[in-house]
Amino acid sequence: MTTEDVRAEAERPLTLPPQLTPPDDGTADPDSVPPPQDKESVPVEEPSATARTTDRSGLTAEQKVLESAASQPAVDNPWLVYPKVKLVKYGLSRLEAVKDEVVALTPDVLPGVDTVTGSLVQVEQDRVIVEATQASDELRLALATRYGSDAVVVRVSADPAPAEEDARWNDTSVGGFYGGARISTSVGGCTNAFPWRYSGYHAMITAGHCTSLNGSVSTPSESMGTVVKDTWNNSKGTVYIDGQSTYRGDLSLIKLSGSKKSTARIYVGNKTSGSSRAVGGMWSRRPTYGDQYCTGGTSTGELCGWKVNALKINVRYGSGNYARNMIRGYKQGQCNIGGDSGGPVYTVNSAGKVIAKGVHSGSGGGGSDNWGGALDPCREYFTDIYEAYYGFPGVIATS
């Protein structure tokens, strides 16, 4: 498998129900589309007849995975084969195993691993790149001894481990809770991402490291609900969920309490903004290299101009926990800071609606002033929205 194969897989459109499929995947330039609205001016929407007849919130994660597999297009001519084979020493499955193991080992097993900040597979070179703050002799020797001298290469990253606690400020259930708003949990302060629907319940998704399973969540104004699903262990990092065999980044599903509701909108604009946009759906495919996008957080507001430069990367946060199968982007200018965690990652389409791309997890770069330049750009890590779609029951709420 080469980089082109990975890119082709990421760019392949995925089959989604009509209400989740936007007319376009949008742009990372919100100034080029219709303006947002203040919450007070947004009418309360009742679900349309179409929405009621196409409700898919009752789908389980397993049903969505099976449905996706069944919807793949058939080959026009099963007898026509175009072989493309490159013989390699290790292969993707072995390299993925190395990528996952190296971030789980302790210094007594792998000396020098405490300096490791991330790992990713470089498929065209048939090897794993281990990112670390220094390429010490003990780390290089330990890696070569355990995996093979040509299976792993160390890339020095001067940037320290990203801050995990990238944990608008007065959101209430009046008119429904919005995404992109400040939330508080036993873990700390963060931002929520997108409204969700499952089995008739109203819900919200955010970053897993912002919450604790079965823990309560609130805004500064009122209680919101309880965490019912989580892909994150607060002492380890990403973990498997519900018996699945895919690591699904850094995610949490919050079930709203009682009759409280969430509305298919997110806050946009600066960190105290009351302006919002409707959620139009999810991206038609998974992220790939060069994709541009925006993030929304309650500490830095809306930041656009991010560009994807790594796929399925494992990253070690400052707490020592590892986020697995993440997407990384970079930009210059203002970086994300504490309190932005769990916020929405998105673009805006020609109709002025938000198209969901993911959930913000952590950040790095930019130095002590959190301002990225050419030599030390901002780094941003997010979980692909498709991990929430396939990992959690239900679907994103759309308008």
Image: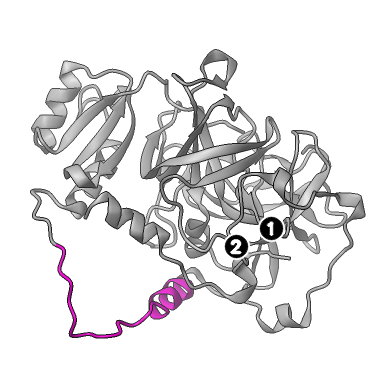
Residue 131: percent from left, percent from top: 31, 29
Query: Is residue 65 covered in magenta?
Result: yes
Q: Separation of disc 2 and disc 1 at Cα?
A: 8 Å
Place of residue 161 in the rendered image (x, y in percent of width and height, measured from the top left):
42, 25
Q: Quadrant of residue 10?
A: bottom left
Question: Which residue bears the numbered disc 2?
Answer: 24
Q: Which residue range is magenta in the image?
A: 62-84
Q: Amino acid at mark 1?
A: Ser
Question: Looking at numbered disc 2 in the image, what kind of residue is underneath it?
Answer: Asp
The answer to whether residue 180 is visible is no
Q: Nearer the viewer, residue 169 or 54?
A: 54
Name above or below for residue 20 compared with residue 292.
below
**Quadrant into which the N terminus falls:** bottom left
Mark number, residue 350: 1
Residue 123 lies in the magenta stretch: no
Residue 280 visible, this orientation: yes
Q: Position of residue 339 (x, y in %)?
A: 64, 32
Q: Secondary structure at mark 2?
A: loop
Query: Which element type, helix, strand or loop, lies under badge 1?
Result: loop
